[in-house]
Image (cartoon, rainbow, N blue to C red):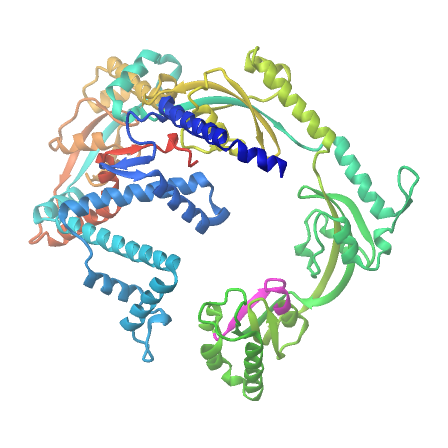
Amino acid sequence: MAILNKIRQKTIVLIVVIAMALFAFVLSGLFDGSASFSGKSQNVIGSINGKDISREEFQLKVENLQRQMGSSATTTQVMNRVWDQEVRQNVLETQFEALGISVEKDQMRDLLKTALATNPQFLNEAGIFDENKLNEYIANLKDNSPTGYASWIDYEQSIATNALQQNYYNLVKAGLTGTLAEGELEHKLEGNKVDIKYVQVPYSSIPDSIVKVSKSDISSYIQDNEKEFQVEESRDIRFVEFEEVASVADETAIINELKTFLNGRLVDETGRKDTIVAFSKVKNDAEYINLNSDIKFNDRFVFKSGLASQVADSLMKLNVGEVYGPYKENGYFKISKLIAEKQIPDSAKVRHILIPFIGAQSAGTDVTLTEDQAKAQADSLLTVIKRNRSKFPELVKEFSSDKGSVDNGGRYDWHPYNSMVPEFNDFEFEGKVGDLGVVKTVFGFHIIEIEGQTSKKRAVKVGSIARKIEPSEETTSKIFREASKFEIAAADKDFETLAEESSYTVRPVNGIKALDESIPGVGNQRQIVRWAFEEEANVGDIKRFNIPGGYVVAQLVAKNKAGLMSVEDATAKVLPIIRKEKKAELIRERISATTLEDLAAAENTTVRTASAINMKNPTISGAGREPLVVGTAFGLNEGETSGLIDGDRGVYMVQVTKITPAVELDNYQAAANRVEQQKSVTVNSKLYNALKAVAEIEDNRAESQIQ
């Protein structure tokens, strides 16, 4: 109370302090370079064709999608997906608005009717869509479920957007017909053919080692082809990973601990009485295993194929009660006991009817039976089937909720042991062919008939005490010290040299983008990416990061600005292109021949032939795809020889030996139709990307704190 009184007495002071703190916070935002208000508001995540996307709205969509996707996607992946959706929606909406197309009330009703035509919730007694039921459903949501109504509005918006997109795509396709002239051209590109003789001087005839390509050559090529080499802002780093892995001493300690369960003991290492019964002498195996193992007991029989391959033979040789191990398997040391054995089929065939109840797993909203009512219905159906098994298929269609088997008469054809839930599995494999019964599982009550079983074979129940192979506290402390020591030393010494001295592996990672999250070798490490893009991070900075299973000590190597790709990064792509151009020059300089025979003799090669070449597929037999060479051939007269042609795989000389024109058609409509179909496919695959390429898109996600 005394403290509360003092707080009350100082209320004015507290208000002033809080106000000053808030004011300072606002000022810090105003003067912070990364959050400047000179451009777009800090609350705008981006802009597409002049339309701003608010940070709050964007974040809400990210959170909603994250809830839907759960752990199947990272926050960054979800954020990127929402951004792509926003870009697509806004790019297309710009087109919709320009054309004045929209979805009005009547069309919306038709769209909903089509989308919900088979939904039982909106069908009348005759199985026909009932608009009144839809209206009632929407009104009920609006009055009683704000969240549900909001979801319904989103659903309607999704349907409307898809319809608008389809309408827009259809309008574009309607303007891209295939004309008869295009059909004739298409026919001639396929039907006009030439036969040629040619000599190829392959670029591989000149060793790469004698062709010198300088950095200035690569730089000039980049400058001449700027559009191909535009890159985003990026960072280069290098790092050393310190993994927390068990040492040999750690593994030995785990093995010795397991041997205690193998052999039993009366006193511990200090001489204190601490009785542990040997695993082989234990009566309640499940309790013993669950008390001492890192993996809980699995009370199921398995065949040899269900055991780890490296120990399957050894375990199958055990007698009931005998123990094998310790042995290593999938990151654990284990000792295993053969608890029981029996002869059972390895596969079975059954048919069933599933009667779910409220609260059962996968039960839909249309399920209205309580558990007792579902059990009573299942027992009643069992009685009917026992009297007349031929009724099984019709009862499946009428009563079973298992959609995966209804169309097959409720039947699950041959399937292996342990592929169903335990209660279902036990009935079908422990019973005999012809047995009928009601079985309860997490999905509801099943009326099951066993239709077939394979011959029986030996199955075993194995219990294992498993200990995860992980580093001890002593080992993890040592690894932490090593990582910290390296981090401190790297601040004053060359990173690479220091790593080599300690036999650490340095891993370079180049071209990291602002919205990347994965670092090759260590997986999803958004924290490292964020650090590399911080304004205050300088080239040469060192930082240690905690990662699952250890640490990473990273160094920022380069801060690459957006613009043209560097010579170093472009070399892998540009070097082969320039090298080929220079080889073509060298080949041309040494050739003086003007006939195929003279060229072949000079280059110690042969004159080859290729028949029925067309422009549609510019491929030369024996040489591969060579569009420029084929195009040149089609520009020659029969008997005419070309000059030297720089192709994709070498320098060529060709001679046309025969020209076969395409057959003249009375009508080119069929070819025109093919052209139109090709255009339609192009609209589906390329229209959006073309619109996106010319859209004005401002992406501020990298500066936001959503990630």
Q: Is residue 420 magenta?
A: yes
Residue situated in front as seen by the camera: 78 or 599: 78
**Compared to 430, does 659 lie above or below?**
above
User: Residue 520 location, x and y as percent?
Assistant: 50, 31
Residue situated in front as seen by the camera: 610 or 122: 122
At x 34%, y 31%, the residue is 42
| Figure label count | 0
At x 39%, y 32%, the residue is 704
User: Residue 567 location, x and y as percent?
Assistant: 35, 17
Q: Is residue 69 left or right of residue 575?
A: right
Q: Is residue 675 left or right of residue 375?
A: left
- Outermost residue on the left side: it is 666
Find residue 135 and report its image quarter. bottom left
Find residue 330 and report its image quarter. top right
Q: Is residue 602 visible?
A: no
**Compared to 627, does 218 lie above or below?**
above
User: Residue 66 location, x and y as percent?
Assistant: 44, 46
Q: Is residue 648 magenta?
A: no
At x 8%, y 53%, the residue is 667
Find residue 47 and report its image quarter. top left
The quadrant the N terminus occupies is: top right
Residue situated in front as seen by the camera: 543 or 315: 543
At x 30%, y 75%, the residue is 128
Q: Is residue 258 visible?
A: yes
The quadrant the C terminus occupies is: top left
**Compared to 631, does 597 lie above or below?**
above
- Outermost residue on the bottom side: it is 387
Q: Which residues are magenta?
A: 409-424
User: Residue 80 location, x and y as percent?
Assistant: 38, 39
